[in-house]
Amino acid sequence: MQIDFSELEELLSPLTAMCKKEKMVNLGGVSVTLRPLTPIEETEVQKMLPDINNEAYAAVEFADVFRKETLSRAIVQIGSMDLRSVKTVSTGQTLPSGVEQKITKGEAILKILSEWSRPVLSKVFEEFTFLNEEIEAEMDSSLKLNTEDTDAISENLKERSEQIKQADTLASVSENTSNEPTEVL
Amino acid sequence: MSQPKYYEPLYRFISSGGEGLVLTCRGRALSFRTPTASDYQGCLRYSASLSEQETFLLACCLTRVGGFKVSEKDRYKLYNHLKSLPRLKKRAMPHFWKVVEETQKSAEMFEAFCYSENSRYLWGKWKSSSRFGFPLEGNELTDIHLQWIAFNELEDKKEDLEDAWRRAFFQASAMNPKGVEKIQKEWDKKRGQEKRHREKVLKLAEKGETSTRDQSGEKTIQDLQTEYRNWVDGVEDGHDKIVREYKENLTRFISNGRKVVSRQKSDSEDMASSFDELNSLSMNTPLKAYSDDEIEKMVASGNRNTVMFDESGDYDEIISDKYLTARELIRDKSSLMDQVAKRKLPTIEG
């Protein structure tokens, strides 16, 4: 029995709901909704990072860029503003030609994030790490496979623990800005 | 857990239509088949990014969701949907490759599986299903399926020939027992060799080993060049290794499978030729009348399109000397009317 794509989407919905899980964080009355990054977005973040061996960058600077670049892609809603299907955002200014000036959604969020204090950024990033771990934990309990690859399971657990450690390191760097960049990640 | 029998993984694989990874999420099963060589080529043509290649493979190989068949026309939409579920891809992919690896490992027992009764039973089931229009359990033909089908079709042909040969042998031996003896001996020898080879392969398979008879230890210049280049370039990464091993295993399986099928083909061709030879001795062969000229030509050239008789057979020699190699008597070559004309007229004797 064959089905069409909308039916297929419906059949895949339990899996979709689990993988596309979002998390709402309340920041003093403003709610921010986060989602996990796609592999392409993860690569984009890596490309935006300053050279870790460049001594001109302080460890905290490196940590800030990493968090901001990640969150600019992870935030899908701020308050009542839904950014899920938005690609560009108007700056509210107009060009001399009379055309409305627009920037990409990522740039817009990045501008907002650069005005946030470091503890706030740190808190939101921590929630983002928890979201990823929640998805992984849910997958652990909900996904059953017809094969058992212990190497893959241990690799997955190792990666997850690395990510949690990474988030801890970033948080500690924010508290103590004297660390060297090489000690960050 | 006890080790499965050598034929079990392939039996399951073929009967399920090449089913690979089965992932169940909150009770809903997603069945993926193992990728074929064309899926692999397709993913390389689609993108240079590893992540996109792997998503492509998942989209290509997802056959059923909750028991419902995924339509071919939805593959691209499915690809985009799976792309938006990165966690799933990340979690499923290592297991997907693991199942592929296990399938390739079980494919090493392909020859032994083909010789097992389980394979013939499954083949019979397949044929019955298609003859009576029942849906088959699986509907995807992987490389393993294609090789297995080719082998079994030739095995069927061999069985038919064997059957026909037995009948022809019975008839021919009644006419000329010594003439069929040589063919019978060759036939039995070949059958014995094949039987011994199959027994050996099955015995090795029971121990978990494969026959190395057809594997060449020689490396080609190209192999050596590749090996050298890899060595100079340094160690390949994990993905390169997976992809390379997958490609190599697939190529090795196809080449080994082809060897099994081609041996099967040449066996049945040999059987067919000896069957023709045998038929020429039997009563089934239509009789052909040779003219005197034709016989003289055949005798002179020593090239006769007939069965060679046993040299030690006295009877054959007598027959041959008398009818085939004897000098022809010079006869009157004049026409029948001339001969009639030359006849003496009858006289009335008083």
Image (cartoon, coloured by chain):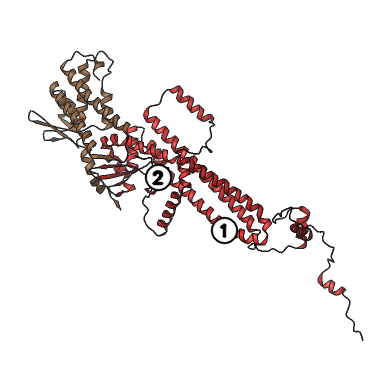
Chain colours: A brown, B red
Amino acid at the residue labelled 2: Glu
Tell me the residue at 47%/47% (across/down): B114
Distance from disc 1 to disc 2, alpha carbons, whole Å, reads: 33 Å
Q: Left or right? Give the position of B203 relative to A67.
A: right
Q: Check disc 1 and report its element: helix, strand or loop.
A: helix
Amino acid at the residue labelled 1: Ala
Closer to us: A20 or B49: A20
Q: Left or right? Give the position of B149 relative to A138.
A: right
Q: Identify the mark nearer the N-term, 1 or 2.
A: 2
Say the numbered circle drawn on residue B164: 1
Q: Residue B43, percent across and down?
A: 37, 37
- The answer to whether residue A54 is visible is yes
**Chain letter for mark 2:** B
B276 lies above or below A18 = below
Near mark 1 (Cα within 10 A), the count class, few <14, some 14-19 or many ≥20, is: some
Residue lying furthest left: A29
Dividing the picture into quarters, in which one does residue B92 lie?
top left
The residue identified by callout 2 is: B8
**Chain letter for mark 1:** B
Q: Residue B199, percent across and down?
A: 51, 45
Q: Which quadrant: the N terminus of chain B?
A: top left
Q: Left or right? Give the position of B134 relative to A23.
A: right
Q: Check disc 2 and report its element: helix, strand or loop.
A: helix
Q: Residue B319, percent across and down?
A: 76, 60
Dividing the picture into quarters, in which one does residue B318 lie?
bottom right
Say the numbered circle drawn on residue A140: none
